[in-house]
Amino acid sequence: MTDNSRPGEIVLTEDPGLLPPDAGLVYIGSIETPWDDRHACPRSGGRSNEICTIHVDGRFAEGLKSVESCSHLIILYWMHEARRDLVVQAPAFDSTTHGCFALRTPVRPNPVSLSVVKLISVDGATLTVRGLDCLNGTPLIDIKPYFPANDSVPDATVGWHGRRTHPERRSIDL
Amino acid sequence: MTDNSRPGEIVLTEDPGLLPPDAGLVYIGSIETPWDDRHACPRSGGRSNEICTIHVDGRFAEGLKSVESCSHLIILYWMHEARRDLVVQAPAFDSTTHGCFALRTPVRPNPVSLSVVKLISVDGATLTVRGLDCLNGTPLIDIKPYFPANDSVPDATVGWHGRRTHPERRSIDL
């Protein structure tokens, strides 16, 4: 444990962000949101009603053909400000620690976040969507169509989440 | 267009796989599936009933704490054999071309694929799941809990997909 972790948290000996990468991502655009500070971001995209704008880089714009026919999209983005070395975390909303792979925190070995968004409109290489919760300027890495036959599981459960002790508390300072 | 693309397809001038990366991924494990050849892979994970095994690297094993309480997970993996420079594609199952961001093809600027899986069991750093469709040995990059409140949209639609002309054809040779 290092000084900047909470009791019960586990920090990796080797920070994945400092290791030689196994594969490389290119940013394909950026995300414009109303939130310039992590403390202002909503708790999770699905609960946010704010309109956000996805700017796809011109070189990839042709990749958007037919996207306008999708009602919902899966957006993958890179949480460029997140640390990558905290495998067990103590979220503010629970008295128990959890592994990063049981959490949707940006703090994980590969800080790729994903949100399911409602597509409002497409204008050239700019998408207007609802359902994001990330910082203004977050780098975009992928856009995928949402197929309910594969992607929708209405009755899925997250056991620990139903038992969390402080659902009203936020973990933005992790 | 280069020799190894189909009519109507658009190839990027610069292959994203050859550009200096903007961010680096570390592989956190690997996925064991019954499919050693792309032609043997199912069309999509949601339609496959096969049991697959996710091996998380020992250094990240503590990150699995509480994962056992999840009924479903989102698995992110790296399609390490996919080309990255084809932005408009001509899938075998349609007479119209589509952008990579309207398709779930592994062929995209950042070949990160995602599947929603049902978690069968956890044994140490090994997860047994149902719902994957990738090649045996595919590198793992993330595991996330599936929250239906944010991730499930049963009535989402993909317009072009409903109008595809050859739903029975496969695009594995792309």
Image: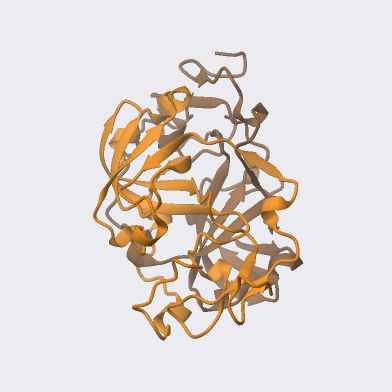
Chain colours: A brown, B orange
At a point 41% along the width and 26% down the height, the residue shown is B61
Where is residue B21? Give x, y as percent.
71, 45
- In depth, the one of B15 and A126 nearer the eye is B15
Where is residue A100? Give x, y as percent.
46, 32
Number of numbered discs present? 0
The quarter holding residue A111 reads: top right
Where is residue A8? Give x, y as percent.
45, 16
**Location of residue B164 with respect to B102 vertically, above or below:** below
- In depth, the one of A70 and A52 nearer the eye is A70
Q: Going by the image, does A136 lie left or right of B6? A: right
**Location of residue B46 with respect to B130 vertically, above or below:** below
At a point 54% along the width and 25% down the height, the residue shown is A86
**Location of residue B120 with respect to A141 vertically, above or below:** above
Q: Going by the image, does A164 lie left or right of A76? A: left
At a point 59% along the width and 31% down the height, the residue shown is A84
At a point 62% along the width and 54% down the height, the residue shown is A141
- In depth, the one of B75 and B30 nearer the eye is B30
Q: Going by the image, does A75 lie left or right of A52? A: left
